[in-house]
Image (cartoon, grey):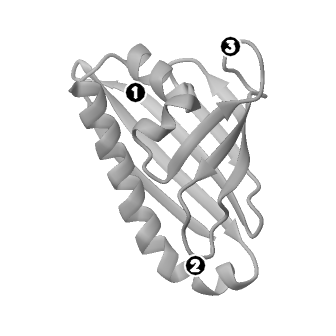
Amino acid sequence: MIDVTVATTVERPVDEVFAFVADMENEPRWHTDIVKAERLTDGAVRGGTNYRVQFRPQPMSPSEGTIEIVEFEPNRRIVSRSDMGNMKPELTHVFEAANGGTKVTRRIQIETSGLMKLISPMMKVMVRRRNAEFLDNLKQLLEG
């Protein structure tokens, strides 16, 4: 299993940062591995909301998948799960007030199988680096 946690502080109020991240249709603006995210569930984002996501092509990774919001605590926490073939990621975002801004903690846990399981130690380094980049993109976008 791959288990990586990264964090940053965004100089914006918690409710603004949470609302932006909670709507996964915003993901392509800061998560550079995602090309498109389309909500499949009507109504406000909540537990049970589903998205269809298209990813940039990468070796040995799926080009699309579905993501379900499984936990949703407004202005506090979002947990989503995906089933993408031989990878089953769970992503947790935690939002905390921090000196007038928002500390965003992003934890990704990926269960792997098949060939992905063999290369997961190498993937962990890449996953940590990429997720730190995604949070940096989020920070720049929301502060810009």
**What amino acid type is highlighted by mark number 1?**
Glu
> Residue 95: percent from the left, percent from the top?
44, 29
Q: Secondary structure at mark 2?
A: helix
Q: Amino acid at mark 3?
A: Ala
| 2 vs 3, front mark | 3
Residue 1 is situated, as x and y percent measured from the top left of the image, at 64, 71
Task: Please name the residue that numbered disc 2 is placed on.
Answer: 120
Element class at badge 1: strand
Which residue has dot 1 on it? 96
Three-letter residue code for mark 2? Ser
Mark drawn on residue 44: 3
> Between 75 and 129, which is closer to the camera in this rendering?
129
Place of residue 23 in the rendered image (x, y in percent of width and height, measured from the top left): 56, 25
Gap in Å between the C-alphas at discs 2 and 3? 35 Å
Is residue 26 left or right of 90 when viewed as pictured? left
Q: Residue at x 43, y 14 (%)?
A: 15
